[in-house]
Image: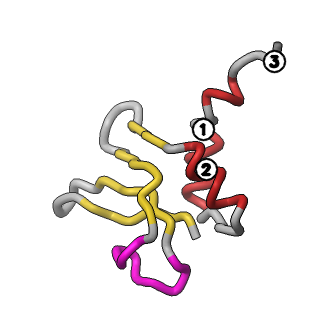
């Protein structure tokens, strides 16, 4: 599963987007970190490794609802480039 793991101080959330087994704890040991999300900036800052996300979803990883929304708002640069 690809979901958020909360890091940061109290009342100052910052999230890592991680690949993790579904039954593990929220901040448990992850397989790989594939991005970050900081909702406290204006606009929210998002850094994603689109190639790794595509790899894991191709191997059967499911996106959480929140990560799915983040991905739709921040598509990969290759998808934005015009076809030649």
Q: Which residue position is annotated with label 1?
A: 73
Q: Is residue 23 magenta?
A: yes
Magenta segment boundaries in residue numbering: 21-30
Location of residue 29 by image quarter: bottom left
Residue 13 position (above or below residue 77): below
Q: Tag on residue 14?
A: none
- Answer whether labels 2 and 1 touch (C-beta < 8 Å): yes
- Cα separation, mark 2 vs mark 1, equals 6 Å
- State the CA–CA distance, disc 3 to disc 1: 21 Å
In screen coordinates, is 41 left or right of 53? Answer: left
Q: What is the number of callouts on the image?
A: 3
Looking at the image, residue 69 lies above or below residue 73 = below
- Marks 3 and 1 in Cβ contact (< 8 Å): no
Q: Considering the image in quadrants, where does the C terminus appear?
A: top right
Q: Residue at x 67, y 28 (%)?
A: 78
- In this rendering, position of residue 15 left or right of residue 68: left
Q: CA distance from mark 3 to mark 2?
A: 25 Å
State the residue position of label 3. Answer: 83
Residue at x 56% of width, y 58% of height: 66
> Which of pointers 3 and 2 lies earlier in the amino acid sequence?
2
Q: Judging from the image, what secondary structure is the residue with disc 2 in?
A: helix
Element class at badge 1: helix
Identify the disc placed on residue 69: 2
């Amino acid at each position: 599963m690809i979901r958020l793991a909360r890091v940061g101080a109290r009342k100052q959330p910052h999230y890592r987007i991680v690949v993790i087994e579904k039954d593990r704890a929220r901040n448990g040991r992850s397989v790989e970190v594939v991005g970050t999300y900081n909702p406290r900036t204006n606009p929210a800052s998002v850094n994603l490794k689109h190639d790794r996300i595509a790899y894991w979803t191709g191997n059967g990883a499911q996106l959480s609802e929140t990560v799915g929304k983040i991905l739709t708002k921040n598509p990969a640069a290759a998808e934005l480039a015009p076809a030649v």
